[in-house]
Structures are given as C-alpha cells and as structure tokens.
Image: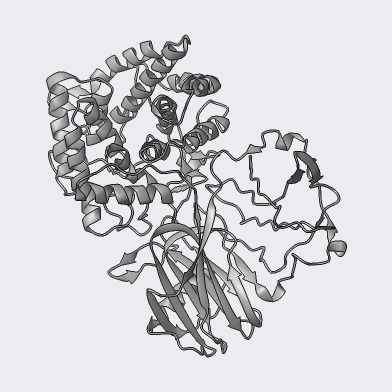
Amino acid sequence: MAVDERSIRNHLRPGVNRIAVQVYSPGYSHFAHVHRGACGLIGWLELDGRVVLTTGPGWKVRRDASWSDRVDRVSIYGTGIEDRNLGLEEAWVEADASAWDAVRVVQEAEGPIWHRLRPRMTALPVEEQRALDRPWQMRVGPAATASDDPHSDLRKVFSLSSETPAPALLPRGTSAIWIFDLGESRACLGGVEVTASGGEQLLISYAEKLREGDLLLSDPATYCRMRPTDRFTLRPGRQVLEGFTPRGARYLVFALEGGGVSPVPRFHVRLPVTPVEERPLPPLDPVLHGVAEICRRTTLNCLQDGFVDGVWRESSLWLGDAVAQDWALRAISDDPRPLLFAIDMAAESADAEGFLPSVLPGEVPAYAVTDYNFSWVELLAGCVTHPGVSAPEAVWQRHWGTLTRMLERMATYQGPDGLLRNPPGRRLFLDWSPMSRAEPNLTLNLRYLHALRLAAGLAEKVGRTADWAAQAGDLAQALQGHRAADGWRESPGGEAASQLALALLILTGMVEGPEASALADRIIARSLDLRDAALPGVPTLASPFMHHYLFLALQQLGRRKDIHAIIAARWGRWVREGRPTTPENWSIDFPDGSACHGFSAHPLGWL
C-alpha cells in the first residue's frame, strides 16, 4: 500500500490547529483495490523529522449524510456512482467536532495490516483547474422524473431535448444540457458553480466519442455496463459542485433541472496530470510526426498511478499492456518508476500457485490471462535497456523467487507432446484479433518460448542455475508439429498461422534465413493492406497492440524502414482522420470501444 506525502506548512497558523480529512469509499469494484464494506484512514504529521501527531483513539469521526450510501457500479470495471444531496451538507472543515463519534481503531499504526506501507513509487499527479466557457453543444428539453439510476435519467433527458441555447432563466419542468469538448480523452473531474432555489437535480456525466456527429452516451445494456453519471441534489443559494472521484472522458456533460436558476452556471474541469520530464521528439516527416504526437498524447494521458490502459472505460493497470506502454514512454522519458511499479505490483500479487495477476494489484478471475505471465518476463528483461534503470540485476534478484515459481507452475501444464495447454479458467491471450484460440495453440506456445529464452538470459547474466534454456529447446522441437506442408498452423491440423504467430516464429528464432524473410514479407503486406476485415488466403490481421511484436520481429531482421511504412499507413490513417489519441483497435465502432488506449501508442518507441 502506498502513502502520499503532502506539505501543510502553508496551512498551519500560530496556536491551536485542527486537521480534518474527508475520506470517501466509492463502493466496490471489479478492477480496482476498493473494499465494498468500509474505508479508513491512517496518517501522521512530521515536524523537522519528528512524528508529532498520529491518527488514533483521540480522533473524531462523523458520517457525511450528504453522500448517499447506495453506491451502484459505474461499470464492470469502475467503482461507484456518486449521488449527493447538498441540502444535507455540513461545514465539516470548520465544524466543532466535540460531539462527533469516537473513531473505531481497526489497527494501530504499527500493526501487521500496515507492514507493507511504503511511500508512493510513482510521481504524485498535479491538478490543473480549467474554466469551461465555450460549450460544444447546448440542448434544452423537458425534465425527467428522477429514478435510482442517474445515467438512465440522463439518457432520457438527452433523448427528449433538442439543440438550442439554454435560457438565462431555466423554469421548473425544463432541463438544460451543456456539453464541453476537451479535445482529447483525459482523466478529469467536472464541476459547476450554480445558484439554485433548492431541490433541483444536476447530472454530471462523461463520454468519449461521437456517432454520426451526435454524442454517444454509453448504453448500460452493452457488455461494459457503462453508466458514468453522477447526481447532485442542489440546496438553495450559490454553491460549487464537484464529484470526488476523477473519471475519464473527452466530452463532459452537465444536465441541470430548472427551478428558476439564474444566472447561467459557471463550469470547470479538474485535470490531473502525472509530471514527466520529457525529451523532445527527433525530426520526422510530417505523417510520422503526426503519429508521434498522437502516440505521445495517449501515452501521457494513460499515465496516472503508473500505466492505465484507457482513461474512459477502464483506467486499470493491465500487466500485458505495460509492455507496449513502457516502450512508448521510454521514447520521451527516462523515468523508470511506472515500469518498476508494474513489475513490483505483479510480483506482490502472485497467487498460491505462482501465477501473476493480469489486472494489478489483484487477480480478476474473469480476466485471468495466461500470456500476461510472459509479459512480466518481458518487463523484467526490458530493465536492461531502460535508460532509467541503473541496476537491472538488482530488480531480477529481488523477484527471482516469483519468476522461478511462475515458470515451474507453467511447466506443469505442458502435455506429453511437450506443448503448453492453457490452465483451466484462464484466457490464452487477451486481444481483439479474431485469430484462433484452438489448442495446443501456436501463439501461446511461442509467447511461452520467448519468455523461457528471456528468463534463461537473465539467469546467465546473474549467475543463477536454471534449466530454462533446455526447456526452450524442447518446446521449440515440439512446436515443429505446427508446421504443415503448406505452412504453419495455429494448432496442428487447424487454421493457418495468424500474422502475430508468424512474427513470433521470427522473434523466437523458429524460422531463419530465407524462410524468415518470406514470412516478414507476408506480415508487411498484410499490414500495408488497409482492409481490416478477415481476408481469404492471408494471415489474420494483428491488433494495434500486437503490432508491437510484429515490429520486434521486423527489427530483428533489420527491417526498420518497413516498420515505419506500416506505422505511416495504419497509424497515419488515424492522423488523417483527425484523431487526437490512439484507439484500442482498428475500428472502435462497437459500443464501448475506447478512443484513447495506451497500448496502441507503442509506435512512439519505434519512431
């Protein structure tokens, strides 16, 4: 668990001071380290290196009744919807706390719960507050009766409204909607200053893309169950409203129920940014420069408490995604902390069998991905070339036990034919490509082979004894069964090898010389053909994410010009379309497709 440190020197006054802290638990979550039942606080005050105050029995606590304790999920990924009644708000900062309840001490500061407490490893984000004064769109229509689902209410109000400027005086029974375009998907928090008569509803929501020119409000009936709308019930008078939890969006939506409100509300947004000391990009031709810029923007926007995959839908640290995101970030920064954070978090959350979590900090059973274990080996190996990691051997030694246990456990899933079968209840790999998942799977086993060879290299560099090189040799021999008279197969007797599998054959040295060059030609031709759908007689197209492995293979053959040509064609298409950030797939027309995904920004490293 990480602890944040903040200076309060500018807040202290001569004489007696009181410290008050607001704590909020946004319910439970499928993908984040949030406890459903309770939240808590631990803290201490240091003065000249001396601890002069700690949390403990002398503290008082009071439930803030303005925050609803009915906290439904935002989505299958996110935490809770915020529903707040400002009429019940108290001036807690300056309140007389003598009548508040005594705190319940779950455990003293020296107890075992806190034994892994440590300073934050990654940079503390800083916030910019920006005024929003030019709406992208304004709409007016009849108000809707409030229900238990604020997002459903917003969708109803939106469907009943039409595009028109909001009047200065908004009568009861009417709702106005203001939509602001941030220009790109960002982690953000919307806010408003408004005068109310009391009891009106304000909805603040977050959206990421348009469909046929209209704002696409997410539909909770789709697979992500997105409902990113928070609700505020207003008190009489002037007030400033903000949520507690940053979300992610390109478009901020404010829907205000009328009640004689005047003057026009004033809107703002908070934009948390992780500070990074950047290097400038090298000179590039105009197309590649445009690609580098959208990749740079995506990389920085998907850098929060370490890497996150996408700011709007998930904001989760996926172990596999970190490979591509680290490759992009190191192109502009020597900061190794996001990389080391991902490595450490994965190791600390390994399960009893030795497998690593796919979503950090803890495993999510529905998204247990086998090849993300191999991604972790790639992250370890990447330390040796990272300009900010001064002692990669120390990182390897620290995690040697985790590496050994994971690979020992993985070996138990190799069948009599020497090929890896996917452990029960896990996904082979997580990717949007429609390539075959039939087993024994060529792509999964090639990822395993690559990890074994990387691990063997680490062992040799630190003088450790391991049989991973021999295991890799045996696996390579077993994989010859995927070779047919007319080419490689994803599974013996199955469909032809995908573009990704062909790249992994080159990367792992399974093919060399003229055969490797011929496979590279096929890989390049498929990527330069900008048709995204499956095509007869050609390898299944890899996703933007997995193109990182295509580029690794092409780099191994010295074909850097071809890497740049593919980037110019496929990522250049996004530049020509005017996209500010890199989406998660070649098409994101599906309902919850993300327009800003960190793993798709890896070309930044190749440029």
Quarter the N terminus occupies? top right
Query: What residue is rendered at 52% in x and 40% in y?
Result: 360
Task: Using the image as rendered, state which of residue 272 and residue 313 is in the foreground.
Answer: 272
Against 392, is 250 above or below? Answer: below
Q: Position of residue 383 (x, y in %)?
A: 43, 27
Q: Position of residue 454 (x, y in %)?
A: 38, 21
Query: What residue is rendered at 42% in x and 55% in y?
Result: 223
Query: What residue is rendered at 72% in x and 58% in y?
Result: 11
Residue 225 seen in the figure: no
Q: Position of residue 390 (x, y in %)?
A: 47, 25
Q: In the figure, is residue 122 to the left or right of 552?
A: right
Quarter the C terminus occupies? top left
Q: Quadrant of residue 428?
A: top left
Query: What residue is rendered at 34% in x and 29% in y?
Result: 444
Q: Quadrant of residue 3?
A: top right
Q: Quadrant of residue 460?
A: top left
Against 588, is 299 above or below? Answer: above
Task: Using the image as rendered, state which of residue 555 and residue 231 is in the foreground.
Answer: 555
Task: Using the image as rendered, state which of residue 44 and residue 319 is in the foreground.
Answer: 44
Task: Using the image as rendered, state which of residue 115 and residue 575 is in the foreground.
Answer: 575
